[in-house]
Structures are given as structure tokens and as C-alpha cells.
Amino acid sequence: MPTPRTGTLYVCATPIGNLEDISLRALRVLREADLIAAEDTRRTRKLCAHYDIHTPLTSYHQHSPPAKAQSLLQQLLAGKGIALVADAGLPGISDPGHDLVVLAIEQHVPIVVVPGPSVVMSALVLSGLPTGSFRFEGFLPRRRADRQALLERLSTDTRTLVFFEAPHRLLHTLADMRQCLGDRRVAVVRELTKLHEQVLRCSLSEALAHFQADRPRGEFTLVVAGGQPLPEAAPSRAEVKEALSKLLAQGLSTRDAVRRVARRYGLPRREVYAAAHEPPGEDASQDVSPSG
């Protein structure tokens, strides 16, 4: 039996808001493909109608059953060219397109990326924060305990941090970031490339106050300054006490303040607790022993 010819999976970036932000190459691929697998067929149908594209559409999203991915794979193996598109931007970044790409790789299906708009890169550049090294986390966990645990782990990362967030969770996320990361600089980017695009560059406290007064609307990308590098020398008790005092003045509990200072300086928590409860008049110039 002859081996069926293999088609190609085209991973196509589409506009993140403004329909003009699409490449000539992407338009050609969408016209010439046998099928467009779209995360949201309504949005993609609007794009196709705008550019007079009549390629058949099928839905492929996070709630699609596994059989749908297998069906698309079989069509690729039979020689069809399929254009994979997300709601906005490049598929495969925090969306189910990644799973289809993995399946195609496993079956040696050719994959072609058609680059274009990116929410992450656009927001990062707009933020004004360092771009040489960054960490993209996508959406934070919904449960507060899980969200705070992740933010605590990120608190010592010196890279610029990038997150997605939905409007109904924005206030909770900003509050947790301020508590777990400290009152850092943030760029809150809303509705990129759309009519009501907004970039708010300020501290986390200022961002929280702004959106408490002005109800969040639209889709948000948060670009947060990275943490400070750990000091090479062990901090003095005076430095530890000063750091604790600042955090307590921000409203943190003693437990949370001690945990954050211990992480910032790479110290055992017991050492930070000891410095916090040291009687007045003790030698504050003495260094605190780092962990390890």
C-alpha cells in the first residue's frame, strides 16, 4: 500500500485587535490552505470576511475533545494543508494550539510558522522595563493560595515578569503581587492595538488604587519589574530590621514580612525572626549569617 503524502501545519499569527496587523504571507496561507482550524470561529470568520477569504473553518479550542485533534492530524497525514489560528496573536502560546503542534511533531508532519503580532512582545516593549531577559507566566492560578505560592517563588527572579489576566481577577492579582513581590514597578497594558488601548506605568500600589476607582474592562497584560539581585555580602541586622520595618509599614503581617526578607537576603527565617525581636540597644551592625 502506498504511503499517503503528508500535508503541512501552518501556525499563523493573526491580529491581536487591529485587523490591519496581518502579514501578506498570512493572508496567502489562509487563502491557500485546505482548512483553517480556529480557536474561535466567530473571530476568524470576521477576519476572513474582511479580507474576502473563503477557506472552510473548523473549531479547535481548549474544550475540544481529543478526537478533534486526532481528526486534524489524520487530515494532515492525508496531505491537507491546515492553517492553525488562535483568538489573537501566535497560536501555541497559552492556548491549545500547542497540543496539535506536539502531535504533528510526533508524526513527522511538516510545520511552518507564519510569524506576526504578539501580545507578550508588544506589551514588554511598551512597558519600558528591561527587555534583555524576561519570564512569561501566562495566566496565574485562580486559587489565591496557589497564586500567592507561585508569586512567592517568583519574588527572587531578577528577570522582568509578564502575565496575562482577566478583568474580573485583576484587583486580586495586583493585591497579591504587591504582597508577595513588594511594591514594584508595573506596566498594565489593556486592549493592545484596539480602540481603547491603555498603558498604565506606575507602582503596583498605584495600579491597584487606579483600578479600584475605575472598574477593569478588557483584556490585560501585566509587565512587572524583576526582583533585586541577592547581595553578595551578608546584610547587617540594621539592614534586616529596616527591610522588615518597611514591609510592616505596608501592612504585611510579621510572618509574611519575615518570609519575604528571608527570601530577599537568602537568610534562614529563624535569623530574621531573631533580628525582628532583638531588644533595643543590641549591636545592629553585626552581620546576619546567610543560609547554606
Image (spheres, grey):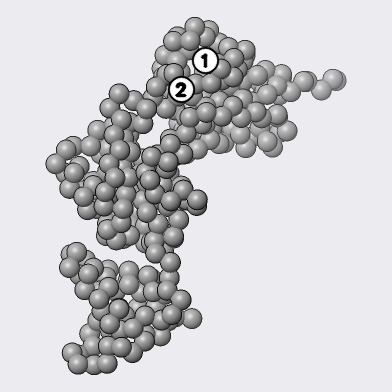
The residue at the far right in this view is 1
Q: Earlier in the sequence, mark 2 or mark 1?
A: 2
The residue that appears at 84% across and 20% down in the rendered structure is: 2
Circle 2 — which element? loop
Q: Amino acid at mark 1?
A: Leu
Q: Quadrant of the N terminus?
A: top right
Measured Cα–Cα span from mark 2 to mark 1: 21 Å
Q: Position of residue 156 (x, y in %)?
A: 41, 64
Q: Is residue 7 left or right of residue 183?
A: right
Q: Residue drawn at (18%, 64%), measured in percent from left and top?
A: 251
In the foreground, 233 or 267: 233
Disc 1: CA contacts within 10 A as few (<14), some (14-19) or many (>=20): some
Residue position for label 2: 21
Viewer-proximal residue among 265 and 105 = 265
Instruction: Judge left or right: residue 93 versus residue 272.
Output: right
* Residue 161 vertical position relative to residue 153 in the rendered view, above or below: above
For the point 42% across and 41% down, the residue is 125
Q: Which residue was labeled with disc 1? A: 57
Expressed as whole percent of the image width and height from the top left, the position of residue 95 reads 48, 35
- Note whether 32 is above or below 186 in the view shown: above
